[in-house]
Amino acid sequence: MPRGDGRLSHDLLPGEKGPQDACGVIGVWAPGEEVAKLAYFGLYALQHRGQEAAGIAVSNGRQITVYKDMGLVAQVFDESSLSTLRGHIAVGHSRYSTTGESTWENAQPTLGPTAWGTVALGHNGNLTNSDRLREKVVAHEAAQRADGLRHGASELERGNTTDTVLITSLLGADPSARLEQTAVEVLRQLEGAFSLVFMDEHTLYAARDRHGVRPLVLGRLDRGWVVASETAALDILGASVVRDVEPGELVAVDADGLRTTRFAEPEPKGCVFEYVYLARPDSRIAGTVVHSARVEMGASLAREHPVEADLVIPVPESGTPAAIGYARESGIPYAQGLVKNSYVGRTFIAPSQTLRQLGIRLKLNPLREVIAGKRLVVVDDSIVRGNTQRALVRMLREAGAAEVHVRISSAPVTWPCFYGIDFASRAELIATGLGVHEICASVGADSLGYLSREAMVAASGRPADELCSACFTGEYPITPPRSVHLGMPTVAQGEFSFDADGVGTGSPGGAADALARP
Protein backbone atom coordinates (compact mmCIF):
# COMPACT_ATOMS: atom_id res chain seq x y z
CA MET A 1 0.00 0.00 0.00
CA PRO A 2 1.17 3.57 -0.52
CA ARG A 3 3.18 5.11 2.24
CA GLY A 4 1.73 8.02 4.20
CA ASP A 5 3.56 11.24 4.89
CA GLY A 6 3.80 12.05 8.57
CA ARG A 7 5.96 15.14 8.13
CA LEU A 8 5.38 18.39 9.91
CA SER A 9 3.78 21.32 8.11
CA HIS A 10 7.13 22.91 7.34
CA ASP A 11 8.52 19.78 5.66
CA LEU A 12 6.60 19.93 2.42
CA LEU A 13 9.31 20.09 -0.19
CA PRO A 14 10.14 16.94 -2.19
CA GLY A 15 13.22 15.21 -0.81
CA GLU A 16 13.32 17.27 2.39
CA LYS A 17 13.25 15.29 5.60
CA GLY A 18 12.42 17.14 8.79
CA PRO A 19 11.07 16.21 12.20
CA GLN A 20 8.66 13.30 11.96
CA ASP A 21 5.74 12.55 14.19
CA ALA A 22 5.79 10.05 17.02
CA CYS A 23 3.61 6.87 16.93
CA GLY A 24 0.09 6.33 18.21
CA VAL A 25 -0.98 3.41 20.44
CA ILE A 26 -4.32 2.18 21.75
CA GLY A 27 -5.45 -0.73 23.90
CA VAL A 28 -9.03 -1.90 24.56
CA TRP A 29 -10.43 -4.41 27.06
CA ALA A 30 -14.19 -4.69 26.53
CA PRO A 31 -15.95 -8.08 26.59
CA GLY A 32 -19.07 -8.05 24.44
CA GLU A 33 -17.88 -5.12 22.31
CA GLU A 34 -16.39 -5.05 18.82
CA VAL A 35 -12.93 -4.28 20.12
CA ALA A 36 -11.27 -4.32 16.68
CA LYS A 37 -13.57 -1.53 15.50
CA LEU A 38 -13.01 0.42 18.70
CA ALA A 39 -9.26 0.15 18.14
CA TYR A 40 -9.73 1.14 14.48
CA PHE A 41 -11.58 4.33 15.33
CA GLY A 42 -9.10 5.08 18.10
CA LEU A 43 -6.22 4.76 15.63
CA TYR A 44 -8.14 6.96 13.20
CA ALA A 45 -8.09 9.67 15.87
CA LEU A 46 -4.34 9.11 16.33
CA GLN A 47 -3.47 9.06 12.62
CA HIS A 48 -1.51 12.31 12.94
CA ARG A 49 1.04 10.52 15.12
CA GLY A 50 2.06 7.96 12.51
CA GLN A 51 1.15 7.55 8.86
CA GLU A 52 3.48 4.84 7.53
CA ALA A 53 1.84 1.67 8.82
CA ALA A 54 -1.04 0.53 11.01
CA GLY A 55 -1.96 -2.68 12.79
CA ILE A 56 -4.41 -4.22 15.26
CA ALA A 57 -4.07 -7.42 17.31
CA VAL A 58 -7.09 -9.04 18.98
CA SER A 59 -7.40 -11.84 21.55
CA ASN A 60 -10.46 -14.05 21.96
CA GLY A 61 -9.08 -15.65 25.12
CA ARG A 62 -7.56 -18.59 23.29
CA GLN A 63 -5.40 -17.06 20.58
CA ILE A 64 -4.18 -13.70 19.29
CA THR A 65 -4.74 -12.60 15.69
CA VAL A 66 -2.90 -9.62 14.18
CA TYR A 67 -3.57 -7.70 10.97
CA LYS A 68 -1.16 -4.97 9.85
CA ASP A 69 0.11 -3.36 6.68
CA MET A 70 1.81 -0.30 5.25
CA GLY A 71 -0.34 2.80 4.79
CA LEU A 72 -2.92 4.92 6.58
CA VAL A 73 -5.44 3.37 8.96
CA ALA A 74 -8.27 3.67 6.42
CA GLN A 75 -6.07 2.08 3.73
CA VAL A 76 -5.02 -0.87 5.87
CA PHE A 77 -8.44 -1.83 7.29
CA ASP A 78 -11.91 -2.36 5.86
CA GLU A 79 -15.05 -4.18 7.03
CA SER A 80 -13.70 -7.50 5.77
CA SER A 81 -10.37 -7.32 7.61
CA LEU A 82 -11.92 -6.01 10.82
CA SER A 83 -14.53 -8.79 10.80
CA THR A 84 -11.74 -11.37 11.10
CA LEU A 85 -10.50 -9.78 14.32
CA ARG A 86 -12.91 -11.13 16.93
CA GLY A 87 -12.31 -11.08 20.65
CA HIS A 88 -12.48 -9.00 23.81
CA ILE A 89 -8.98 -7.45 23.96
CA ALA A 90 -7.26 -5.37 21.27
CA VAL A 91 -4.05 -3.39 20.90
CA GLY A 92 -3.46 -1.08 17.94
CA HIS A 93 -0.61 0.98 16.52
CA SER A 94 -0.11 3.68 13.89
CA ARG A 95 3.54 4.01 13.01
CA TYR A 96 6.10 6.53 12.00
CA SER A 97 9.57 4.97 11.90
CA THR A 98 11.94 6.72 14.29
CA THR A 99 13.92 3.48 14.63
CA GLY A 100 14.00 0.77 12.01
CA GLU A 101 13.19 1.07 8.34
CA SER A 102 9.75 1.76 6.92
CA THR A 103 8.95 -1.84 5.96
CA TRP A 104 6.15 -4.31 6.57
CA GLU A 105 8.40 -6.34 8.87
CA ASN A 106 8.64 -3.34 11.20
CA ALA A 107 4.91 -2.63 11.34
CA GLN A 108 3.29 -3.09 14.76
CA PRO A 109 1.90 -4.64 16.92
CA THR A 110 4.71 -7.19 17.14
CA LEU A 111 4.02 -10.76 18.25
CA GLY A 112 6.20 -13.00 20.40
CA PRO A 113 5.91 -16.28 22.28
CA THR A 114 5.91 -16.52 26.07
CA ALA A 115 5.92 -19.48 28.44
CA TRP A 116 2.16 -19.08 28.88
CA GLY A 117 0.99 -17.99 25.44
CA THR A 118 1.62 -15.03 23.16
CA VAL A 119 2.35 -11.33 23.64
CA ALA A 120 1.32 -8.57 21.18
CA LEU A 121 2.88 -5.13 21.70
CA GLY A 122 2.78 -1.58 20.34
CA HIS A 123 5.32 1.11 21.28
CA ASN A 124 5.46 4.90 21.09
CA GLY A 125 8.89 6.38 21.78
CA ASN A 126 12.55 5.42 21.38
CA LEU A 127 14.79 3.36 23.60
CA THR A 128 18.29 4.71 24.15
CA ASN A 129 19.89 1.40 25.19
CA SER A 130 18.76 -0.64 22.18
CA ASP A 131 22.30 -1.80 21.39
CA ARG A 132 22.74 -3.45 24.77
CA LEU A 133 19.23 -4.93 24.69
CA ARG A 134 19.83 -6.33 21.20
CA GLU A 135 23.02 -8.04 22.38
CA LYS A 136 21.07 -9.60 25.24
CA VAL A 137 18.23 -10.82 22.97
CA VAL A 138 20.64 -12.27 20.38
CA ALA A 139 22.56 -14.13 23.10
CA HIS A 140 19.34 -15.49 24.60
CA GLU A 141 18.04 -16.68 21.23
CA ALA A 142 21.38 -18.36 20.48
CA ALA A 143 21.28 -20.18 23.83
CA GLN A 144 17.72 -21.34 23.17
CA ARG A 145 18.68 -22.64 19.76
CA ALA A 146 21.66 -24.50 21.18
CA ASP A 147 19.38 -26.14 23.77
CA GLY A 148 16.86 -27.10 21.09
CA LEU A 149 14.21 -24.78 22.55
CA ARG A 150 13.90 -22.49 19.51
CA HIS A 151 12.90 -23.52 16.02
CA GLY A 152 12.42 -21.25 13.02
CA ALA A 153 13.51 -17.67 12.54
CA SER A 154 12.95 -15.04 15.22
CA GLU A 155 11.53 -11.57 14.55
CA LEU A 156 15.08 -10.20 14.49
CA GLU A 157 16.16 -12.85 11.98
CA ARG A 158 13.10 -12.14 9.83
CA GLY A 159 14.22 -8.54 9.41
CA ASN A 160 12.49 -6.58 12.19
CA THR A 161 14.92 -3.78 13.09
CA THR A 162 12.86 -1.86 15.68
CA ASP A 163 13.47 -1.47 19.37
CA THR A 164 9.87 -2.70 19.82
CA VAL A 165 10.80 -6.27 18.86
CA LEU A 166 13.50 -6.21 21.54
CA ILE A 167 10.90 -5.47 24.22
CA THR A 168 8.63 -8.20 22.85
CA SER A 169 11.48 -10.72 22.87
CA LEU A 170 12.51 -9.84 26.41
CA LEU A 171 8.93 -10.25 27.64
CA GLY A 172 9.02 -13.87 26.47
CA ALA A 173 12.53 -14.68 27.65
CA ASP A 174 11.71 -16.13 31.09
CA PRO A 175 10.38 -19.68 30.65
CA SER A 176 8.90 -19.85 34.14
CA ALA A 177 7.39 -16.44 34.94
CA ARG A 178 4.00 -15.15 33.90
CA LEU A 179 3.88 -12.07 31.65
CA GLU A 180 2.95 -9.56 34.34
CA GLN A 181 5.83 -10.66 36.56
CA THR A 182 8.27 -10.61 33.64
CA ALA A 183 7.02 -7.21 32.49
CA VAL A 184 8.01 -5.52 35.75
CA GLU A 185 11.57 -6.84 35.42
CA VAL A 186 11.84 -6.00 31.71
CA LEU A 187 10.48 -2.47 32.12
CA ARG A 188 13.21 -1.77 34.67
CA GLN A 189 15.82 -2.64 32.04
CA LEU A 190 14.51 -0.22 29.42
CA GLU A 191 16.07 3.22 29.06
CA GLY A 192 14.65 6.05 26.99
CA ALA A 193 11.08 6.95 26.14
CA PHE A 194 8.32 4.37 25.93
CA SER A 195 4.56 4.36 26.16
CA LEU A 196 3.51 0.74 25.65
CA VAL A 197 0.29 -1.17 25.14
CA PHE A 198 0.55 -4.96 25.12
CA MET A 199 -1.49 -8.03 25.91
CA ASP A 200 -1.52 -11.77 26.21
CA GLU A 201 -4.60 -13.92 25.62
CA HIS A 202 -6.31 -12.74 28.84
CA THR A 203 -4.92 -9.39 30.01
CA LEU A 204 -4.37 -5.90 28.62
CA TYR A 205 -1.29 -4.00 29.83
CA ALA A 206 -0.08 -0.41 29.51
CA ALA A 207 3.18 1.09 30.73
CA ARG A 208 4.99 4.42 30.61
CA ASP A 209 8.68 5.15 31.20
CA ARG A 210 9.63 6.79 34.48
CA HIS A 211 10.03 10.17 32.79
CA GLY A 212 6.64 10.06 31.05
CA VAL A 213 8.15 11.59 27.90
CA ARG A 214 5.31 10.45 25.62
CA PRO A 215 1.66 10.80 26.70
CA LEU A 216 -0.56 7.84 27.65
CA VAL A 217 -4.05 8.08 29.14
CA LEU A 218 -6.52 5.71 30.75
CA GLY A 219 -10.24 5.83 29.94
CA ARG A 220 -13.45 4.06 30.98
CA LEU A 221 -15.94 2.53 28.57
CA ASP A 222 -19.45 1.46 29.56
CA ARG A 223 -18.30 -2.16 29.49
CA GLY A 224 -14.56 -1.94 29.68
CA TRP A 225 -11.36 0.08 29.64
CA VAL A 226 -9.22 1.81 27.06
CA VAL A 227 -5.68 3.26 27.04
CA ALA A 228 -4.46 5.56 24.28
CA SER A 229 -1.73 8.02 23.36
CA GLU A 230 -4.11 10.98 23.55
CA THR A 231 -7.45 11.89 25.09
CA ALA A 232 -8.82 12.72 21.62
CA ALA A 233 -8.95 8.98 20.92
CA LEU A 234 -10.99 8.44 24.09
CA ASP A 235 -13.40 11.17 23.01
CA ILE A 236 -13.98 9.46 19.67
CA LEU A 237 -14.84 6.19 21.43
CA GLY A 238 -17.17 7.84 23.93
CA ALA A 239 -14.88 6.87 26.80
CA SER A 240 -14.52 9.03 29.89
CA VAL A 241 -11.02 10.15 30.79
CA VAL A 242 -9.94 8.62 34.09
CA ARG A 243 -6.33 9.84 34.39
CA ASP A 244 -2.90 9.75 32.81
CA VAL A 245 -0.93 6.55 33.12
CA GLU A 246 1.73 7.69 35.58
CA PRO A 247 5.44 7.72 34.75
CA GLY A 248 6.96 4.43 35.94
CA GLU A 249 3.55 2.71 36.17
CA LEU A 250 2.35 -0.62 34.76
CA VAL A 251 -1.43 -0.96 34.40
CA ALA A 252 -3.12 -4.34 33.96
CA VAL A 253 -6.79 -4.99 33.09
CA ASP A 254 -8.47 -8.41 33.04
CA ALA A 255 -11.58 -10.19 34.33
CA ASP A 256 -10.53 -9.37 37.90
CA GLY A 257 -10.53 -5.62 37.19
CA LEU A 258 -7.80 -2.99 36.99
CA ARG A 259 -4.58 -3.06 39.00
CA THR A 260 -1.35 -1.09 38.89
CA THR A 261 2.29 -1.70 39.74
CA ARG A 262 5.03 0.88 40.22
CA PHE A 263 8.18 -0.42 38.46
CA ALA A 264 10.21 2.82 38.78
CA GLU A 265 10.14 6.04 40.75
CA PRO A 266 8.68 8.83 38.60
CA GLU A 267 10.91 11.65 37.35
CA PRO A 268 8.50 13.54 35.04
CA LYS A 269 10.01 14.97 31.84
CA GLY A 270 7.08 15.33 29.45
CA CYS A 271 7.91 16.39 25.90
CA VAL A 272 7.26 20.11 25.42
CA PHE A 273 7.04 19.56 21.64
CA GLU A 274 3.80 17.64 22.22
CA TYR A 275 2.29 20.99 23.22
CA VAL A 276 3.95 22.84 20.34
CA TYR A 277 3.05 20.45 17.54
CA LEU A 278 2.74 16.69 18.00
CA ALA A 279 -0.52 16.25 19.90
CA ARG A 280 -3.96 17.00 18.51
CA PRO A 281 -5.18 20.44 19.63
CA ASP A 282 -8.32 18.86 21.13
CA SER A 283 -6.30 16.56 23.40
CA ARG A 284 -5.38 17.16 27.02
CA ILE A 285 -1.88 16.47 28.33
CA ALA A 286 -1.37 16.48 32.09
CA GLY A 287 -4.64 18.40 32.41
CA THR A 288 -3.80 21.13 29.88
CA VAL A 289 -5.87 21.49 26.71
CA VAL A 290 -3.31 21.55 23.90
CA HIS A 291 -5.27 24.12 21.87
CA SER A 292 -5.28 26.51 24.82
CA ALA A 293 -1.52 26.08 25.25
CA ARG A 294 -0.93 26.91 21.59
CA VAL A 295 -3.20 29.95 21.69
CA GLU A 296 -1.25 31.19 24.71
CA MET A 297 2.02 30.59 22.86
CA GLY A 298 0.70 32.82 20.09
CA ALA A 299 -0.37 35.50 22.55
CA SER A 300 3.05 35.43 24.21
CA LEU A 301 4.66 35.63 20.77
CA ALA A 302 2.68 38.81 20.07
CA ARG A 303 3.86 40.34 23.34
CA GLU A 304 7.47 39.39 22.74
CA HIS A 305 7.61 40.25 19.02
CA PRO A 306 5.06 42.91 18.04
CA VAL A 307 5.02 44.31 14.51
CA GLU A 308 2.87 46.72 12.53
CA ALA A 309 0.88 44.64 10.06
CA ASP A 310 -2.52 44.32 8.38
CA LEU A 311 -3.27 40.59 8.80
CA VAL A 312 -2.23 37.59 10.85
CA ILE A 313 -2.33 34.34 8.86
CA PRO A 314 -1.41 30.80 10.00
CA VAL A 315 0.50 28.10 8.20
CA PRO A 316 -2.29 25.52 8.45
CA GLU A 317 -2.97 23.51 10.40
CA SER A 318 -0.16 23.53 12.93
CA GLY A 319 0.14 27.31 13.09
CA THR A 320 -3.59 28.03 13.43
CA PRO A 321 -4.07 28.13 17.25
CA ALA A 322 -0.94 30.25 17.75
CA ALA A 323 -2.05 32.62 14.98
CA ILE A 324 -5.41 33.03 16.73
CA GLY A 325 -3.58 33.90 19.96
CA TYR A 326 -1.27 36.33 18.16
CA ALA A 327 -4.22 38.09 16.50
CA ARG A 328 -6.19 38.39 19.74
CA GLU A 329 -3.26 39.76 21.70
CA SER A 330 -2.02 42.15 19.00
CA GLY A 331 -5.39 43.37 17.77
CA ILE A 332 -4.35 42.64 14.17
CA PRO A 333 -7.15 40.94 12.20
CA TYR A 334 -6.88 37.18 11.71
CA ALA A 335 -7.41 35.80 8.21
CA GLN A 336 -7.04 32.60 6.25
CA GLY A 337 -4.41 33.51 3.71
CA LEU A 338 -3.33 29.98 2.80
CA VAL A 339 -5.54 27.09 1.73
CA LYS A 340 -4.34 23.60 2.62
CA ASN A 341 -4.98 20.49 0.54
CA SER A 342 -5.47 17.89 3.27
CA TYR A 343 -5.24 14.96 0.89
CA VAL A 344 -1.64 15.37 -0.24
CA GLY A 345 0.99 13.02 1.16
CA ARG A 346 4.60 12.58 0.17
CA THR A 347 5.40 12.78 -3.53
CA PHE A 348 8.34 10.93 -5.02
CA ILE A 349 8.10 12.82 -8.33
CA ALA A 350 10.92 15.36 -8.36
CA PRO A 351 9.84 18.74 -9.79
CA SER A 352 11.81 20.36 -12.59
CA GLN A 353 13.61 23.64 -12.01
CA THR A 354 10.62 25.38 -13.57
CA LEU A 355 8.30 23.70 -11.08
CA ARG A 356 10.62 23.95 -8.09
CA GLN A 357 7.81 25.27 -5.89
CA LEU A 358 5.44 22.45 -6.81
CA GLY A 359 6.16 20.65 -3.54
CA ILE A 360 4.72 23.40 -1.37
CA ARG A 361 1.96 24.40 -3.82
CA LEU A 362 0.63 20.85 -3.76
CA LYS A 363 -0.24 21.39 -0.12
CA LEU A 364 -0.60 25.16 0.34
CA ASN A 365 -1.96 27.77 -2.03
CA PRO A 366 -2.28 31.52 -1.28
CA LEU A 367 -5.58 33.39 -1.37
CA ARG A 368 -4.40 36.29 -3.50
CA GLU A 369 -7.54 38.36 -2.92
CA VAL A 370 -6.87 38.24 0.84
CA ILE A 371 -3.13 38.92 0.96
CA ALA A 372 -2.42 41.17 -2.03
CA GLY A 373 -1.00 44.50 -0.86
CA LYS A 374 -1.12 43.46 2.81
CA ARG A 375 1.57 43.42 5.47
CA LEU A 376 1.41 39.86 6.80
CA VAL A 377 2.31 38.18 10.07
CA VAL A 378 2.78 34.51 9.16
CA VAL A 379 2.63 32.17 12.18
CA ASP A 380 4.08 28.64 12.18
CA ASP A 381 5.10 26.20 14.91
CA SER A 382 8.82 25.78 14.13
CA ILE A 383 11.60 26.05 11.54
CA VAL A 384 13.82 23.06 10.78
CA ARG A 385 16.04 23.55 7.74
CA GLY A 386 14.23 26.65 6.53
CA ASN A 387 13.66 25.41 2.98
CA THR A 388 9.88 25.41 3.21
CA GLN A 389 9.70 28.80 4.93
CA ARG A 390 11.88 30.17 2.14
CA ALA A 391 9.54 28.79 -0.52
CA LEU A 392 6.49 30.00 1.42
CA VAL A 393 7.78 33.56 1.78
CA ARG A 394 8.60 33.64 -1.92
CA MET A 395 5.12 32.36 -2.79
CA LEU A 396 3.42 34.99 -0.63
CA ARG A 397 5.44 37.77 -2.21
CA GLU A 398 4.55 36.50 -5.69
CA ALA A 399 0.90 36.59 -4.60
CA GLY A 400 1.25 40.30 -3.83
CA ALA A 401 2.09 40.48 -0.11
CA ALA A 402 3.64 43.85 0.71
CA GLU A 403 5.60 42.54 3.72
CA VAL A 404 6.05 39.08 5.27
CA HIS A 405 6.87 38.92 8.99
CA VAL A 406 7.46 35.33 10.17
CA ARG A 407 6.61 34.42 13.76
CA ILE A 408 7.43 31.02 15.25
CA SER A 409 5.51 29.74 18.28
CA SER A 410 8.47 27.81 19.69
CA ALA A 411 12.10 28.47 20.46
CA PRO A 412 14.77 27.69 17.83
CA VAL A 413 15.24 23.94 17.32
CA THR A 414 18.99 23.35 17.65
CA TRP A 415 19.36 19.75 18.85
CA PRO A 416 18.04 16.36 17.68
CA CYS A 417 15.54 14.26 19.64
CA PHE A 418 16.24 10.69 20.75
CA TYR A 419 12.87 10.05 22.39
CA GLY A 420 10.48 9.51 19.50
CA ILE A 421 10.70 12.51 17.14
CA ASP A 422 12.92 12.12 14.10
CA PHE A 423 14.45 15.60 13.82
CA ALA A 424 17.14 16.34 11.26
CA SER A 425 20.75 16.01 12.42
CA ARG A 426 22.20 18.93 14.33
CA ALA A 427 24.36 19.99 11.39
CA GLU A 428 21.21 20.24 9.23
CA LEU A 429 19.17 22.36 11.67
CA ILE A 430 19.32 25.94 10.45
CA ALA A 431 19.13 27.46 13.94
CA THR A 432 22.26 25.55 15.01
CA GLY A 433 24.50 27.31 12.53
CA LEU A 434 22.81 30.70 12.30
CA GLY A 435 21.37 33.35 14.56
CA VAL A 436 17.90 34.82 14.08
CA HIS A 437 19.23 37.70 11.97
CA GLU A 438 20.85 35.29 9.52
CA ILE A 439 17.86 32.92 9.44
CA CYS A 440 15.61 35.87 8.63
CA ALA A 441 17.85 36.78 5.70
CA SER A 442 18.02 33.16 4.57
CA VAL A 443 14.24 32.66 4.36
CA GLY A 444 13.71 36.11 2.84
CA ALA A 445 11.35 37.47 5.50
CA ASP A 446 11.04 41.12 6.50
CA SER A 447 11.41 40.09 10.14
CA LEU A 448 11.55 36.91 12.18
CA GLY A 449 10.64 36.26 15.79
CA TYR A 450 10.86 33.07 17.84
CA LEU A 451 8.95 32.52 21.06
CA SER A 452 11.24 32.42 24.08
CA ARG A 453 11.75 29.07 25.73
CA GLU A 454 10.43 30.45 29.01
CA ALA A 455 7.13 31.53 27.44
CA MET A 456 6.82 28.27 25.52
CA VAL A 457 7.22 26.26 28.73
CA ALA A 458 4.88 28.55 30.68
CA ALA A 459 2.11 28.03 28.10
CA SER A 460 2.17 24.28 28.76
CA GLY A 461 1.04 24.87 32.34
CA ARG A 462 3.76 22.58 33.69
CA PRO A 463 6.90 23.41 35.69
CA ALA A 464 10.04 23.64 33.59
CA ASP A 465 11.71 20.88 35.61
CA GLU A 466 8.91 18.47 34.61
CA LEU A 467 9.41 18.97 30.88
CA CYS A 468 11.94 17.78 28.33
CA SER A 469 13.03 20.63 26.07
CA ALA A 470 16.27 19.02 24.90
CA CYS A 471 15.64 19.83 21.23
CA PHE A 472 15.77 23.51 22.21
CA THR A 473 18.52 23.37 24.85
CA GLY A 474 20.67 20.29 24.31
CA GLU A 475 20.06 19.31 27.94
CA TYR A 476 18.98 15.66 27.69
CA PRO A 477 17.16 14.21 30.73
CA ILE A 478 17.97 10.68 29.47
CA THR A 479 21.46 9.88 28.22
CA PRO A 480 21.41 9.64 24.39
CA PRO A 481 22.42 6.36 22.71
CA ARG A 482 26.13 5.63 23.01
CA SER A 483 26.52 5.53 19.22
CA VAL A 484 25.34 9.13 18.80
CA HIS A 485 27.74 11.95 17.92
CA LEU A 486 26.30 15.39 18.66
CA GLY A 487 29.12 17.53 17.32
CA MET A 488 29.07 20.22 14.62
CA PRO A 489 31.58 20.85 11.86
CA THR A 490 34.25 23.23 13.15
CA VAL A 491 34.10 26.76 11.70
CA ALA A 492 35.71 30.01 12.62
CA GLN A 493 33.73 32.00 15.17
CA GLY A 494 31.33 34.39 13.48
CA GLU A 495 31.71 32.91 10.00
CA PHE A 496 28.72 31.69 8.07
CA SER A 497 27.71 31.21 4.46
CA PHE A 498 24.74 30.14 2.37
CA ASP A 499 24.74 27.05 0.18
CA ALA A 500 23.05 26.77 -3.23
CA ASP A 501 19.66 26.36 -1.57
CA GLY A 502 20.19 29.34 0.71
CA VAL A 503 20.72 27.20 3.80
CA GLY A 504 23.20 28.78 6.19
CA THR A 505 26.19 27.03 7.72
CA GLY A 506 28.46 28.45 10.37
CA SER A 507 28.86 29.13 14.03
CA PRO A 508 25.89 29.53 16.38
CA GLY A 509 24.97 33.02 17.40
CA GLY A 510 22.24 35.59 17.72
CA ALA A 511 19.53 36.19 20.27
CA ALA A 512 16.01 34.83 19.76
CA ASP A 513 14.31 38.14 19.03
CA ALA A 514 12.72 39.84 16.06
CA LEU A 515 15.25 41.44 13.76
CA ALA A 516 14.62 43.56 10.70
CA ARG A 517 15.57 42.09 7.37
CA PRO A 518 18.91 43.54 6.18
Image: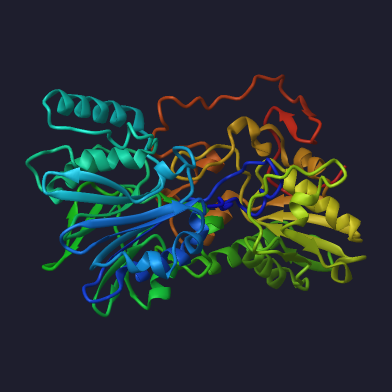
* Corner quadrant of residue 83: bottom left
Viewer-closest of 33 and 295: 33
Colour approach in the figure: rainbow
Q: Is residue 50 left or right of residue 39?
A: right
Q: Is residue 500 left or right of residue 138?
A: right
Q: Position of residue 70 (x, y in %)?
A: 48, 51
Which residue is at a point 79% across and 51% down the rendered structure image?
A: 358
Viewer-closest of 314 and 328: 314
Residue 244 appears in the figure:
yes
Q: Position of residue 310 (x, y in %)?
A: 84, 68
Q: Is residue 411 left or right of residue 164?
A: right
* Corner quadrant of residue 94: bottom left
Which residue is at a point 67% across and 49% down the rendered structure image?
A: 347
- Can you name the residue that lies furthest to the front here? 80
Residue 287 appears in the figure:
no
- Can you name the residue that lies furthest to the left here? 176
Q: Position of residue 338 (x, y in %)?
A: 76, 65
The total number of labels drawn is: 0
Q: Position of residue 492 (x, y in %)?
A: 72, 19
For the C terminus, give its image quadrant: top right
| Residue 183 vertical position relative to residue 289 in the rendered view, above or below | above
| Residue 284 vertical position relative to residue 345 in the rendered view, above or below | below
Which residue is at a point 39% across and 63% down the rendered structure image?
A: 286
Which residue is at a point 13% across and 38% down the rendered structure image?
A: 174
Viewer-closest of 256 and 138: 138
